[in-house]
Amino acid sequence: MVTHLDHPPAEPVGDEARRDQPRYLNRELSTLEFNARVLALSDDPQVPLLERVKFLAIFSSNLDEFFQVRVAALKDMVAAHLGKQSPDGRNAAQQLEEISDRVGELVSQQEQIFLERVKPALAATGIGISDWDDLDEEDRKYLIDVYEQRIFPVLTPLSFDPGHPFPYISNLSLNLGVTVADPDTGEHRFARVKVPPLLPRFVITPDGERFVPLEQVIAAHLATLFNGMDVVDFVPFRVTRNADLTLEEEEADDLLEAVEMELRRRRFGRAVRLEVDHRMSQEMLELLLRELDLEPDDVSFHHAPLGLSGLWAVHALPRRDLKDDPWMPTTPPALAVAADGNKSIFSVIREGDVLLHHPYDSFATSIEEFIRQASIDPAVLAIKMTLYRTSGDSPIIASLIRAAEAGKQVAALVELKARFDELTNIAWAKALEQVGVHVVYGLMGLKTHTKTALVIREEAGALRRYSHVGTGNYNSDTARLYEDLGLLSADPDLGADLIHLFNHLTGYSREVRYRKLLVAPRWLRPKVQDLILGEAKAGKQGRIIIKMNSLVDPAMIDALCEASQAGVEIDLIIRGMCCLRPGVPGLSERIRVRSLVGRYLEHSRIYYFANGSGAGRPTYYIGSADLMERNLDRRVEALAPVEAPALQARLQEVLDVSLTDDVLAWQLDAEGQWTRVPTERHLDAHRRLQELALIRSRA
């Protein structure tokens, strides 16, 4: 593990304005409103039916993560009696109360959508989500055989009585709470049966299009688990625990071992939520609350099956008629020649920078091909990359291994603290180390979130640097679902910046002043603030457009509000959290905020400043950073300028399409309410960007 020399982050501005609490929206409630927009897609009849099922599953997964991390953190604050307020003026207890109310509303909506609209619509197409009691005799015989052959052998009932302690309930596990009675004494006892997580969430009937919840199949056979006892009652329940890692990096001799240890501890995190079937008895509920150390406010009652993230199994059905039209990413025209084998990808990049826009542009024929060719090109001497999240079967990792085995210098910064990807990253770190890759785990106290790669190639007796700076992870799976941008460049200044950045990440070098990159935590905050201030000085000639995932940082919100007051027109395209109140007279009346939620997860970050380059010339940046305190002050991030006029036009095209969309778009008002943008043009940004990619490829 390497360390960095301490340097204080740039001093935030706007402390006086920060005290004006009404200007901010609450971060946690804003996160829930993003999930509400996701949930709305599951209730949209214009969305193909199995995609609506997908959005129900995504909503459930998002809510699980929200409780494991955000709610858990707030509960820790309450337990520690910390009275710290959020920038919007709420303490932790107030936030938990409002979260509980809003989550209750959203879960009720989700169940209504699933039970009353999606489930009947699935049945009308021949896809049944059936209860055990609704099955005919033939189906039951089949499922009895499945139970005996594949389910019963892996079940372990655990009793709770004076001789048996209360069983440990693991995070996000689905369980059956069972009450059994001794037929001789009439004594009632509690037992827990864990639904095995390695088995499919739903059992599929022989026709392949009917799904029965696994817990119902188990419940129908409880007598086989409690021989000689009478099964009095059984109810499904599910527990969510605190799953955030708490690392004392300064005290760790080996970061990899420390993360592995914390992952083992994560299993025993404090319970923060209990989901139960609405039929659960008060006696069983009180027992669970007591043993899990939870309060009645921590309970969520359900009529639908618990853990609807399992609906991914239904979405996986091969019913193309019920899904989005398939999209085959195109190869960017500049790289098509390289893909045909007529040129190396390096000769193409030498001729000019290449802008990539995934998933419209193929990840396989661009980024993966860039690293693949580097791994086998005898002129390539070194490859350096940051790896934050990558896929389980990663072609990029395979290329890095191949390059190391060929004797090239390969350095990979693997971020072990990437939340919920820690195990995958540990496995890749070990695999890379075994073949001689130089693996480092980043800087103490900082996550390395930047998405950068550098290839060093010997050409005509000199060394040339080829760079990639992106907004998304080096992950071939998410590249098909996440909207991201990337820049391939042979620009010497950008390459020199990446050399310095990697030396800082892997060694003991001090950070330098970068020529083109904006790097957090030291340089990014003050530069973005300067760019916003520059537009404010331009007054009505100023213009700011920022596309990002989240806007939370109070100082950045203050700066944007000050620019608005100076006459600058500002458009913010924010997928998730937004803590800025737009359209407030005298404060933010020239700021508009919209969010696109649809087929692809909007993930790219684009920063546009009309006067950023001076002399009235615009500046465009892309990169990994959102305007959040964690990104600006506690992570290694990088933004890169896009300078070629043709590529700037491409970025402006993305911004224009995003601002014109009236199918996927939502808008935020001054009261913090999100509403759909009225549909007039019927412009779907995702479809339009697909069309533009096809036009470019055919040209």
Image (cartoon, rainbow, N blue to C red):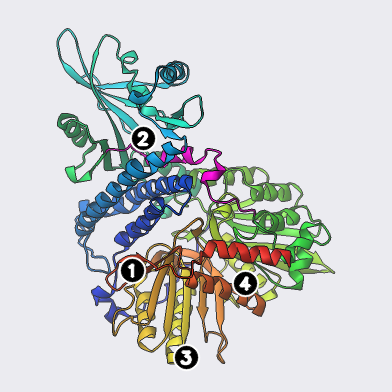
- Numbered tag placed on residue 497 in the rendering: 4
Tell me if residue 98 is in the magenta stretch. Answer: no
Mark 1 lies on a secondary structure that is loop
Mark 3 lies on a secondary structure that is helix
Question: Does 115 appear above or below 487?
Answer: above
Mark 3 is on which residue type?
Gln
Q: Nearer the viewer, mark 3 or mark 4?
A: 3
* Residue at image location 39% in from the left, 52% down from the top: 248
Give the magenta part as a residue range.
303-328
Label 2 and label 3: CA atoms lie apart by 56 Å
Give the farthest residue toward the front: 124
Mark 2 is on which residue type?
Ser
Q: Measured from the top left, where is residue 132 in percent x and y? A: 35, 25
What residue is disc 2 on? 173
What residue is disc 3 on? 541
Mark 2 lies on a secondary structure that is loop
Marks 3/4 in contact by CB < 8 Å: the verdict is: no
Crowd tier of the residue under label 2, counting other residues whose Cα lies within 10 Å: few below 14, some 14–19, many 20 or above: some
Q: Measured from the top left, where is residue 501 in percent x and y? A: 59, 67
Question: Does 582 appear above or below 439?
Answer: below
Tell me which label, 3 or 4, sits earlier in the chain: 4
Mark 4 is on which residue type?
Asp
Crowd tier of the residue under label 4, counting other residues whose Cα lies within 10 Å: few below 14, some 14–19, many 20 or above: many
Q: Measured from the top left, where is residue 156 in percent x and y? A: 36, 21
Tell me which label, 2 or 3, sits earlier in the chain: 2
Q: Quadrant of the C terminus?
A: bottom right
